[in-house]
Amino acid sequence: KDWDFPSSGVFSGLKIDPDTLVKKLDLDSRSIISSRTGLEEKTILSKKEKMKLRKERWLQKIESVKLATQKQKAEAKRKATPVVGDMQPLMEALPELSDLTT
């Protein structure tokens, strides 16, 4: 089919006042992200400070990995104990003796 529109245009009879198109946003209608960016300033760190922070995070990662391996080794050692087995979960589940007497 051939779409034949009048030569005057589809929106020729439409009258829009330009003042109705202008709208100002108040603080309540602004998005959260845009309101945050206007209020806060980012802290600027020097290169040395950034390197110190990276090193601290790296050392914390190493320490957490080390602790995890130590826990695994201790659990494996407790499980390898012949007759008794792993008593640590049982000890954690039982109440303290002081709790029972009071």
Image (spheres, rainbow, N blue to C red):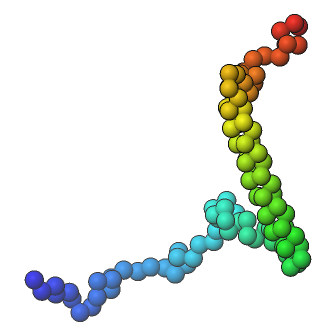
Tell me what residue is drawn at x 67 percent, y 65 percent.
33
Please state if 14 lies on the left or on the right of 80 as rendered.
left
Compared to residue 24, the image places residue 9 above or below, namely below
Compared to residue 22, the image places residue 91 above or below, namely above
Residue 16 image point, x, y percent: 44, 79
Tell me what residue is drawn at x 79 percent, y 64 percent.
58
Compared to residue 19, the image places residue 83 above or below, namely above
Tell me what residue is drawn at x 73 percent, y 65 percent.
36
Residue 97 image point, x, y percent: 85, 13
Q: Residue furthest bottom?
A: 7
Q: Which of the two residues, 6 or 13, is positioned nearer the viewer here?
A: 6
- Quadrant where the N terminus is found in the figure: bottom left
Q: Which of the two residues, 69 or 30, is positioned nearer the viewer here?
A: 69
Q: Residue furthest front?
A: 82
Tell me what residue is drawn at x 68 percent, y 38 percent.
76
Residue 26 appears in the picture as rendered = no
Residue 78 image point, x, y percent: 72, 32
Q: Which of the two residues, 54 or 72, is positioned nearer the viewer here?
A: 72
